[in-house]
Amino acid sequence: MSLNFEFSEEQRMLEESVWRWASTWLEPQMEKLYEEDKMPPDFFKELGKLGVNGIAFEEEYGGAGLGYVETLLAYETIGRVSNALAMSAGASQTLCFDNFRRHATDDQKKEILPKACSGEYIGCLGITEPNAGSDAMSMSTRAVKKGNKYIVNGSKTFITNGPVADFMVFYAKTEPDKKARGMSAFFFFPKKTKGFSCEKIKKWGMRTSPTGLLTFEDMELPEENLIGGFNRGVGVLTGGLCTERITLSGCSLGSQRSCLELSIKYAKERVQFGRPIADFQMIQEKLANMYTGYISSKMMAYRAAAYCDSLKDKRGGKGTDLDRMAAASLLYCGETGTKIAADAIQIHGGYLDQKLWDIGAGTSEIRRMIIARELMRDDFQSGR
């Protein structure tokens, strides 16, 4: 059996073009932007020029017609400069617009996706609530049908891109008595809709990626804003979690790589007791562990992305190998990235944005539950 983990020429060109942009256009702004906790105003339009928005979208909508390996690679490369902005890119393009793309009508896709690819629209996804984090099915946001409209009341919190979003996909209970079977998915335009408000959340980490507390107060939506059908929201939600977990692993990978590269550079330059600290065995051990963790994380993530690309049905969900592999990818990348960041701090100090990937897109505990559940399947194959 041949195992080849080399990128294709096209993928290497993608990485080089995104890195050239990130290191020349984005990086010079980051210190000031981080202090002010602001997203670059043209961030998504710049990504549109690069062709990064909608990498996995069909060309008829302005996408590149590529896959999740390329999406992961783009997010990793952006993450080398800004973990926070890599997350914002993923929240808009993968969590919001990619999931919308899978379930929207042809007319809806023709209207929305070209503007998502160009960067004219910034997207966000509303799942998490103040009392419903990892247990998304216990959400309390309600959408009540009245005539040809839905009346929405409730709130969402820790919503990435919430304060700047032009387009939003969110979930609400349409028949609460049916529990998970009584949830529906909707879309709307936050800046144009009455009854909606967003309060920016001040954060210690992940600055430059705006996060919001969203409130729905008798917000009216036309019935055509329903996605995927009445009470079909759980399928829409779970169908996007695998690609979310896989591609957001790239944010962690980018941070890991930067921690390693900066730590090697600093260890060679920093002199203590008359010699570079890179000469000391304890520093060498940390650098070796950081490298091993990064390479292992990379193999986990890109293996999951390549497997996803090989599937005709990429929804994943309970009872699939993809669900296990996606959870394992972000579990390993998140926890390993935290260790790598901690070692980088020990060597010369650093940022703690990396910690999010222990808890974002489902906590480590939730990911372990998914992996263990799928290991118990009768048709489980240990070689996958």
Image (spheres, grey):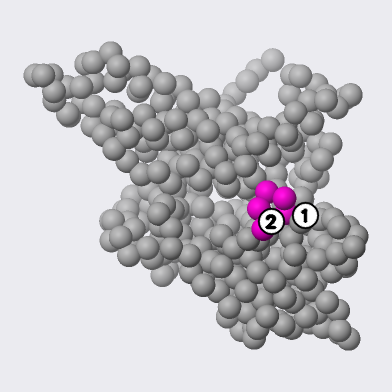
Q: Is residue 321 left or right of residue 130?
A: right
- Asked whether the beta carbons under mark 2 and mark 1 sit within 8 Å of each other, the answer is yes
The residue carrying pointer 1 sits among few (fewer than 14), some (14 to 19) or many (20 or more) residues within 10 Å by Cα, namely: many
Kind of residue at disc 1: Met
Q: Quadrant location of the C terminus?
A: top right
- Residue 109 drawn above or below residue 70: below
The residue carrying pointer 2 sits among few (fewer than 14), some (14 to 19) or many (20 or more) residues within 10 Å by Cα, namely: some
Magenta segment main secondary structure:
loop
- The residue nearer to you, when weighing 307 against 245, is 245
Q: Quadrant of residue 276?
A: top left
Badge number at residue 132 = 2
Numbered range of the magenta stretch: 131-136
Mark found first going from the N terminus, 2 or 1: 2
Q: Is residue 250 left or right of residue 364?
A: left
Kind of residue at disc 2: Ala
Q: Quadrant of residue 155?
A: bottom right
Which residue does the image show at 57% across and 31% down from the upper left? 332
Residue 98 seen in the current view: no
- Residue 277 drawn above or below residue 14: above
Q: CA distance from mark 2 to mark 1?
A: 8 Å
Q: Quadrant of residue 104?
A: bottom right
- The residue nearer to you, when weighing 103 against 11, is 103
Residue 216 seen in the current view: yes
Q: Which residue is mark 1?
A: 137
Percent across and percent down for residue 306 are 66, 35
- Secondary structure under the numbered disc 1 in the rendered image: helix
Q: Residue furthest front?
A: 131
- Residue 267 drawn above or below residue 216: above
Q: Is residue 89 left or right of residue 263?
A: right
- The residue nearer to you, when weighing 163 against 254, is 163
- Magenta-span inclusion, residue 134: yes
- Residue 224 drawn above or below residue 51: below
